[in-house]
Image (cartoon, grey):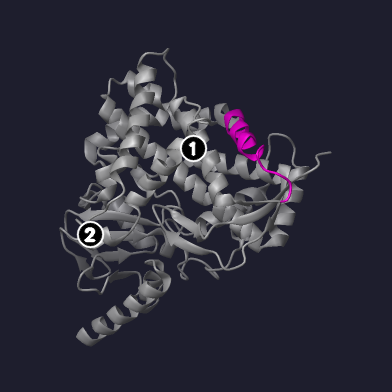
Amino acid sequence: MTEMRAFMGWQVLKALIKERSLLGPLRLMAAKLGQVFQFPLSFFHPFFVSGPEAVRKVLVTERDKLLWRSTDPVTDLLHHGVLVTDGAEHDHYRALMEPALRPDVLPAYTELMRRHAGRVTSLWQDGQKVDMLVESRKITLLIVFDALFGVDIWDDLPRIWTPVLKAIEFISPGAWIVWRHIPRPGFTKPLRQLDEFLFAIISARRAAAPKSDLLGHLLDAGLSDDQIRDQMLTMLIAGHDTSTALLAWTFALLGQHPPVMSRLVEELDLAEPGSHPHLLDEVIKEALRLYPPIHLGSRQVAQEMDFDGQQVPAGERIFYSIYLTHRDPHSWEQPNRFCPERFAHGRKQPPFAYIPFGGGPRACIGAAFGQAEARLLVSYLLKNFTFVPLNSGAIHAHMGATLEPRPGVFMKVTRRERL
């Protein structure tokens, strides 16, 4: 056993150095050790689980044995945001925020989303090379601020761009996972600037007429400025960064599979106003399967758990891997292949084999919003522009706060002549 642990430790270290992310080591260990394993490094040994049954335990049947709140940079940044609170505190914040994100209110955001996509793309020149990772972030930032906080940040985008990126970098996997108090220079100023921007929005809204958006619900509930800031920053980071990654990966995959892109464009052109073709949903779902933006969930074990005979003691850190679950060969045929048709005609997957928005009582609060946004934006962009992929090398998955395509998704864009 000791020799096996040492061998795996060496293999894991090589994979970590080669890919510069945990994805390589995680795939290696899942292939060798199965769906439940402990990371075999002396300085980093949390437990990892994947697959439908293990995920069901974490998210539903034994979720009370786990805590979301932990001592890491996510909590340092979000303080008491809905994402990093437990129990009654979490339930209170979630109940306040859900009315602004219910599926029945989403049609009210349609024109807003289309307008912001149009503003960003109005700056594109025919034949220009654009990075869809960057352009998607511009659009989704404009949307999240306008839809949820009632603020048009078009003129502010240049000055908050770096603070937002630094906030995302602050909570992205890094050396802090194994050395909690590693010095991290360069974050204090941009994070302060982002806080000042959010507090200014709160102050202005307190003096303005009431609105029924998410910020309005938080104000009406009598929360303090600090409590509101925490929820706003949570929704800002989680709400725009996940949508950015989804849009970028969708265009990356379409660029790598021209026949699918051509078929989707044709179906969008023929679709009746107000409808969307099945292939659009299938492509988005398959992008979420292969590259789930939230690829890894972290918990603290409060009470000992058992996964197929593997004991996970209280006090340990446990990660559940959405990425590995979505590529589990026991649940998916040819799991690494881009195949939108696997979601065609109401095909069903095993419960908890497909969890891009988590599951159970704490499933992503913005799941419906994010899916509606993705459908609208992909449709809008493909109807109005042709996209020719320009990446000279492979696009790889980078484990940031979300799973990002690096070095970017470069496309030559040309405005289409609409009949």
Amino acid beneath label 2:
Arg
- Tag 2, which secondary structure? strand
What residue is shown at x 51% (from left), y 54% (from top)? 288
Q: Which mark is residue 401?
A: none
Say which quadrant the N terminus sits in: bottom left
Furthest residue to the right? 419
Q: Earlier in the sequence, mark 2 or mark 1?
A: 1
State left or right for residue 414 relative to residue 72. right
Could one spot residue 366 in this view of the protein? no
Say which quadrant the C terminus sits in: top right
Magenta-tinted stretch: 111-127
Residue topped by disc 1? 158
Q: Which mark is residue 317?
A: 2
Q: Quadrant of residue 213?
A: top left
Mark 2 or mark 1, which is nearer to you? Answer: 1
- Tag 1, which secondary structure? helix
Residue 237 magenta-highlighted: no
Figure check: 367 above or below 225: below
Figure check: 204 above or below 233: above
Q: Could you tell me residue 390's position as x and y percent?
A: 65, 60
